[in-house]
Image: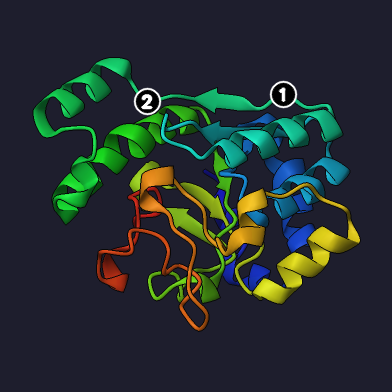
Amino acid sequence: MDINLFKIEDFENKTAEEILKFALEKYQNRVALASSFGAEDVVLIDMILKINPNARIFTLDTGRLPQETYDVMDRIREKYKINIEVYFPDAKLVEEMVSNYGFNLFYKSVELRQLCCKVRKVEPLNRALKGLDAWICGLRREQSVTRTEIRKIEIDTAHNSILKINPLADWTEKQVWNYIKENNVPYNALHDKGYPSIGCAPCTRAIKPGEDIRAGRWWWEAPEKKECGLHKK
């Protein structure tokens, strides 16, 4: 990784489009967007494909996603005429986990919830990132207490020190939705039903007025625990 050729801190004042243009031109097929098809990710899909219609986009299908997520995946595929790389969890690992701990193990303890995330998300992500020099994410600082310090470009020490690119790090929720509306970007129908953050169906609920935007994710856990392991430092 030739990270010494540029200063990461210099990108903090760059726009999302400028950062994406840099990443796509520099790394070409060795950079990809990791998309869960939430609001931030569909914004990035639209931005990226306007820069490079052949850019790589992948998703992790955990096997427990809401139907509305699959619906928006197909709407995105049809609108932009793209192929989406899909990574599934290892079937044997899922079978062993469910046999040992049950179908709804994630409700039993933080440790078992993290195990489920590891099997269904982290292991497939590790396969998706093989051969990449950088990956693009839709993380924003205002999303949760665990994300307030993210930078627009980071060294991902959890994944062989490749670059982790967060073009929307400084965006507000209002900016995200303004972009979606102004550019007619398809989005997950659950957003209109009180779901600002969407993950697996059993681990996601609508939020109540005044709640934090990530309150509906693993709502039975403390806020500082609410990460699935994909974004470890």
Mark 2 falls on what kind of element?
loop
Residue farthest along the bottom direction in this orientation: 210
Tell me: residue 219, above or below residue 134.
below
Q: Is any part of residue 140 visible from this angle?
A: yes
Q: Amino acid at mark 1?
A: Asn
Q: Which of pointers 2 and 1 lies earlier in the amino acid sequence? A: 1
At a point 48% along the width and 69% down the height, the residue shown is 207
Classify residue 62 by image quadrant: top left
Residue that carries the numbered disc 1 in the rendered image = 83
The residue carrying pointer 2 sits among few (fewer than 14), some (14 to 19) or many (20 or more) residues within 10 Å by Cα, namely many
How far across and down, in percent of the image, does residue 197 sit?
52, 59
At a point 73% along the width and 43% down the height, the residue shown is 24
- Residue 90 located left or right of residue 198: left
- Residue 1 located left or right of residue 176: left
Residue that carries the numbered disc 2 in the rendered image = 89
How far across and down, in percent of the image, does residue 22 sit?
75, 52
Residue farthest along the left direction in this orientation: 100
Classify residue 36 by image quadrant: top right
Q: Amino acid at mark 2?
A: Pro
Whether residues under marks 2 and 1 lie with C-beta atoms below 8 angstroms apart, the answer is: no
Q: Is any part of residue 34 visible from this angle?
A: no
